[in-house]
Image (cartoon, coloured by chain):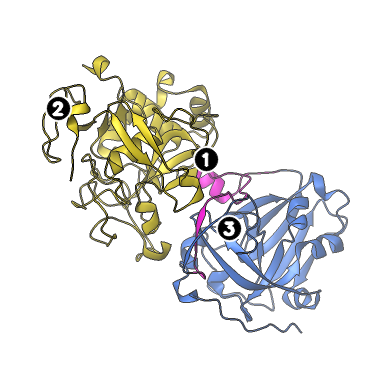
Chain colours: A yellow, B blue
Amino acid sequence: MMNKTGENDGEIMSTSTEARVSISCPDNMIMVPSGSFIRGTAVFPDEGPVSTVYMDSFAMDIFPVTNDQFALFIDSGGYDNSTLWSGHGWEYIRRNAIRFPNYWHDPRWNQGDHPVTGICWWEAMAYASFAGKMLPTEAQWEYACRGTDGRTYPWGNDEPTLVHANYAPGCDPAELKRSSTAIDAYPRNKSYFGCSDMAGNLAEWCLDNASPDYSYDLTHHNPVYITREDDYHIARGGCGLHNETYLRCSSRDNYPATVRDNLIGFRCVVNDLAKWK
Amino acid sequence: MSTCIAVTTPNIHKKPSSLRYYQDGPPQSVDLNKWQLLLTGLVSGGRSFSYAEILKLPQIEESRRMVCVCNWSIRRTWKGVLLSTLIEIAGVPSPEKLCLKQTSIGTPEKGVYEATIPLADAMARRALLIHSVDGKPLKLEGGFPLRLLDFGLYGYKSVKGLSKLEVTDQYALGEWERRAGYDLDGTIRPKKYWGVDLGTWCFVNQPGEVKGI
């Protein structure tokens, strides 16, 4: 794999994927250097038009946010702290008396090293605020997943098998009562820049609202599509209920901000690395 | 007596399990001699229909695609009665201002499943009350003895194993909206959907019922 780490403001210390760790990178995050990548495909209309997109550097969680991590948010009073929530989000959790993720007490989904799920977009945003981070834009997500070599899947171009990820051939999971898997259960499920578990298991909320395609993007520089926070939002990476095509780095899906189904989790990014220091 | 055309849906053995999407679960059994569909609420004349009475109404048999919010779809040949036929019998003066609340037979363990849809929209979309698919009566896990399908909406807005239809002015949240925050509206969105019968993906460009695929 070809790596171009010299574009990262001098913060990336190594050229190997395994050792690509910066001394200034937040714990358990990967530094994704500034650079360009090919966004989108011609496979589906919503993934086009294909174009080169320029991204500033950012740090991304190596793994999705786990139940253990989310427990810290709960234990710290995250559901009672209005300063962590947008107005819409605060109103939504108050109106619905939300105190925990939707599957918090279900052993098929609540294991400590499994990604948290059953969280609406606002819960993901509130956690990110709690952690001093942000949700990734879908461009950040795709860049971190696909890197600069145009690969199809996070691990490369090998077609997925059940050793790569937790997914459902034919959209029909083998188990009627399916469950999530540990964030490190699939060692091959590692992206170009070294993020794990991006394909399958749980899709991941992104900052962007749903857009029909990328025709809105006129600058091709750190694109993000924002309409209304209570509108549909992008979820990336597919889940244990979806099949191979969702595992592709470029595949897009979207759900209402209110959805708290066991399809979606999230991971965070840090954009202002100087401030983090 | 109603007769059906025997049709085999391609790849039907690969259809995602109906049990996964029958959230209240099918009843152990349904005695057709006792089962009735109650049509009530803001109607001129509330009444109930036996299974035999449903079969005596004008029958519609159509090949149409249903879409699950979990991103798969299937085109099958459905047979039943237009929702508008029952609404006409019951008498609803202004359906454009009203909704239809559907309630399932349910089970003792999980209770009933409810979903509410705009009535006039459903009638305009030729929603069906279905008793047979691919030439055979619905199976219990498929919604026997009668299910509704509004083909412009995701499947969670249409109830299997119906026991009651209530015409109401309350556009209330249903089971899946309450349980997991899905849209009250439930209109099928432009997206890619796995076509079970097609064995491939199809991309839908317009909201609403998927036609021509």
Give left or right: position of B33 versus A31.
right
Magenta segment boundaries in residue numbering: B171-198
- Is residue B48 placed above or below A50 in the rendered structure? below
Identify the chain of the residue marked 3, using the numbered disc in the image. B
Image quarter of the C terminus of chain B: bottom right
- Is residue A155 placed above or below B196 in the rendered structure? above
The residue to which callout 1 is attached is: A256
Amino acid type, residue under disc 2 in the picture: Ser
Mark 3 is surrounded, within 10 Å at the Cα level, by few (under 14), some (14 to 19) or many (20 or more) other residues, namely: many
Mark 1 is surrounded, within 10 Å at the Cα level, by few (under 14), some (14 to 19) or many (20 or more) other residues, namely: some
Image quarter of the N terminus of chain B: bottom right
Quarter of the rendering containing residue A204: top left
The residue to which callout 3 is attached is: B155
For the stretch drawn in magenta, the main secondary structure is loop
The residue to which callout 2 is attached is: A22
- Is residue A171 placed above or below B208 in the rendered structure? below
Mark 1–mark 2 Cα distance, whole angstroms, equals: 36 Å
Amino acid type, residue under disc 3 in the picture: Gly
- Is residue A185 placed above or below A97 in the rendered structure? below
Are marks 3 and 2 in one subunit? no
